[in-house]
Image (tube, coloured by chain):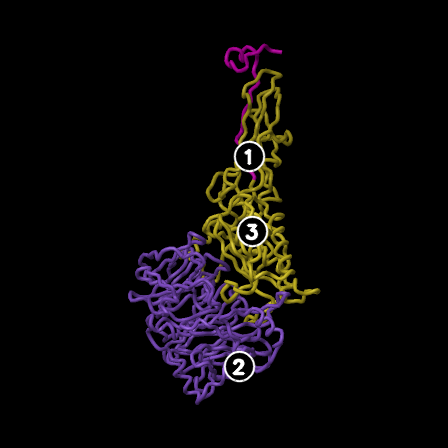
Chain colours: A purple, B yellow
Amino acid sequence: MVESRWLRWIGPGVVAVGAVGFIASATFGAGVRPWIPQGCAGPSPGLTGAARDPGAADLAALPSTAWFRLDPLADEAGDLRGQRLAVGLDGDRTARTLDLPVESFAAGPFGRVVLAGSDDGVASRLEAIDVEGGCSWTIAVAADVIRRATVDLAGTTVYEMRIDRATRGDLGIWSRPIDGRGAARRVLEPIPVDERFGRTWSTEFAWSLDGDRLAVQSCGEAACRTRIILPGGGRAPMLDAPDLGLLVGLDGDRLVTYAACRGLPCPVIVTDLRGGGRRVLADDVRAAVLVRTADGARLIHEQGAGIRARLRAAPLDGRLATDLGPLPDGLRLQASPIEAASATKVPAGWVLLTPDGRLPIEPSATRPILRHIPDGATVPLDEALR
Amino acid sequence: MTTCLRGGRAFALTAAVFIGLLVPAGGVLAHGPDPAFSGGSFGQDQVLRFRWRSGSEPSPAIKTAIKEAAADVASSRSSRAAMFTYDAAGANPIGYGVGATCGVNGLACFTRDAPKGFTMWLREQGHVFDWGTLKWCQSYTTAPNGCYDAETIALDEFGHVESLDHHVNYSTNSDYEDAVVQTFSSTKPSTGWNRHTFGRCDSATLQLKYDVTSSSAKVSTCLDVATVLTLTASSVSIPTGGTTTLTARLNAVASASYGRLSGNALGGRTVTLQRRATGTSTWATVGTMPSGSLGGTYVVAQRPTADTQYRAVFTTPTNEGINGDTSPTVAVDVVTCTTVASSDVAIAIPCA
C-alpha cells in the first residue's frame, strides 16, 4: 500500500500548517509516513470492537498490537509549534504520523485504537484512530477544552477531563458512550483548590492493572492528588498527601506513586487506599512501571545510572525486591504512558526496554527488547514479532 | 550549648521523609536549611561540564539563561559545592523540549548520579499545561507578567543537582527569598521570580554538604551552629614582669548534624580577651585578640603584674549562623624569683 505523503492537522482548525509541514518533511526517515486517516467505514458501534481490550496477550499477539509516540515540534526560536503523533503496529515498524496543534494529547492503545485530542483555540476534537484499520472516528467535538481522555476496558465508555476555555478552570471528569449514543455526563467534580498543591499543571488518567478502576491524578508543580472511580461509578476518598507525586500505577486498592520530586532518582511509595498505610517500595528510582505477573503486581524500576544501571522488581507486599540484571547500553525501561508519552501493550510478565525509554519512530534506531520478569530472559522486540 | 540546627530541624529530612514516615499532612515544618537528597554528593569544587543535548538543544535565549545560572552557582554557592560550566564536549547533557523526561508536570527536571554526572531538561516555550501556556521571560523583548525566568529555574535545577531538595517555607511564605530551590516557582512579578543567587537556606545546606571555602568564610545565617572556644596560656606561672602568650581557639562543635562544618576551625572572627584580678568577680575587656597563624586561632601576649584570670569571649555575630561561646577561665600567677626557681623549672631564668 502506498501512503499519501502529505500532512494534515486533525482538529477543527488549521494553524500554521505550512510551517509544521516543512518541519515534518525535513525530519522524516524512511520508515515514517505522514498520514491522514480516512473516516472509518460503518457506524460508530464498530469503534467499540476496535477499542475493546483483547485481554491477556502473549508474544504471538504483539505484531497486531498498536503503539504510539507523541513529540513536541519546536521552531528555531524554541517555541512549541505543534506535536507530532506517530502510530503503528508492533509488527509493522512503519510509522504513520499526524501533526497536531500545540494543545493536544494522545492516549492508548485501547485495543487497536489510539485516542488523539486536539484543540485549535475554538473547539476541542477527540478522535479514535484505528491503527490497524488505518481510519478514524470522531468521538466528540466540544466547546470546552478536552485535556485528556481514556477508554474503558470494554471499549464502551470514554472519560474526558475538561477545562473551561476562557478561565482554564477545572470542569471535572466527564464520561460518554463511545458510540455517541447518549450525552456526556460529569462523573467527578472539579478538584477543589488546595494551596498545598498550587495550581493544576496536569490531569492524567491511568487504569488499574485489572482495568476496572480509573485513577484520575491532578498534579501541581511537584505534588499530586489522586481520585479513583470505582467499578460501577463509585468513588474512593481522594488521596491528597502533599508529599506524593506522579502516578506509577494502580493495583486494586494499592496506589503506586513517586514521592513529590522534581527530578530523579526519587522514592516510589505504595499507598493502601483503604487503610491509608504506606510503604516505600524503593528509594532511588528512575524510570518505573507497574506490571502484572503471575505472582502478583511488581514495580519494575531502574536503579543506578550509566553502566551501573540495573532493573529491579519490587513486590507491593513488602517482600524483597529481585534483580533483573543490567540495562543494555542505550536502552531504558519504557515507563508508563504518562512519563514516556509513548506506549504499546506487552504481555503480562514482560517489560519493554527502548532507546531513551520511548518507542523509536525510526526502524533503524537501537532495537527495543523485551525482558521477562520472572527470569530476566531477554528477547529483541523484532525477533518476538517474527 | 545546643547542637541543633535553627528550628530544631534534622538535616537528613529528605531521607527521613522518604523512609516512611513523612511530613505530617499539611507539611508543617519549621524553617531551616533546604532538605537534602540522599544519594551522595559531588566532590568539593568539582567542575561539572555540560553540553546541549543533541536533537533537543535549547533556544539561544534559553542557552544564555542556563549559562548565566551556572555562573550564578559559582558566585553564590558560599561553599565548596560543585560548579557547572558549558563545554561542547561535556559529559552532562542539558535538553530542551523534545524528549523531555520530566513526566507531565513541572517546568524543568533533572537526574543526578553523584559524583559522576547529571542531566537536565527545560520545557519548551509554549508547552500547554492545565493552567495555561508556559512562557519563558527570556523569549520576549519585554517579559510579560506570568512568565517564568529561565535563569532562576535553571539555578533551581542546578541546586537540585547539587543535592538540594525544596525549601520548606513558613505557612506565610515570608521566607520565600531564603531559597531559590522552591516547590512552587514564581512568575513575574511575584516575589523571587528573578532571583539569580542561592538563598541563605540553599547555601546553608551546600555548606553542610560541601564545607565552606575557608576557615574565615561566613557560615550561612540559615544555620545555627554551636561553637566551642578554648583558651590556653604559654605559661600559667610567670615571674614579675614576665610575659605569657594566650591562645584562643574557636571551632564549630563536632557533631554529625553539622556535616562538613563539624569541628571546623573558625578564623577571622572577633574574639575578645577579658581579665580580672584573681579573687574578684568583675571582668574587664583587654581587647580583641589578633588572628594567629593557624586557622581558628587568636593570639595575644600579656604581662600581668599580679595574679590574673583570663577568658576569651566570642559574641554571637549577627551576620552569620554561628553561636557565641566563652572559654573556660585560665589563671596566670605572678610569682617571685625564689618561688619560681624552686618550683617551676619552666621559668628557670634569673629575675630581671
Q: Could you give the CA–CA distance between mark 2 and mark 1, rounded to whole angstroms?
A: 71 Å
Going by the numbered disc 3, the residue's amino acid type is: Gly
Q: Which residue is mark 2?
A: A125
- The secondary structure type at the circle numbered 2 is strand
Q: Specify the subunit that label 1 lies on.
A: B
Q: Which residues are magenta?
A: B324-352
Q: Which residue is mark 1?
A: B250
The answer to whether marks 1 and 3 sit on the same chain is yes
Pick the residue in front: A333 or B270.
Answer: A333
Q: Could you give the CA–CA distance between mark 3 and mark 2, rounded to whole angstroms?
A: 44 Å
- Residue A66 in the magenta stretch? The answer is no
**Which quadrant of the figure has residue A123?**
bottom right
The answer to whether marks 2 and 1 sit on the same chain is no
Point 51% across, 60% down: residue: A262
Q: Which residue is mark 3?
A: B90
Q: How far across and down, in percent of the image, does residue A116 sit?
A: 49, 77
Q: How far across and down, in percent of the image, does residue A42 sit?
A: 44, 89
Q: Residue furthest right?
A: B142
Q: Is residue B94 above or below residue A50?
A: above
Going by the numbered disc 1, the residue's amino acid type is: Leu
Q: Is residue B352 above or below residue A325?
A: above
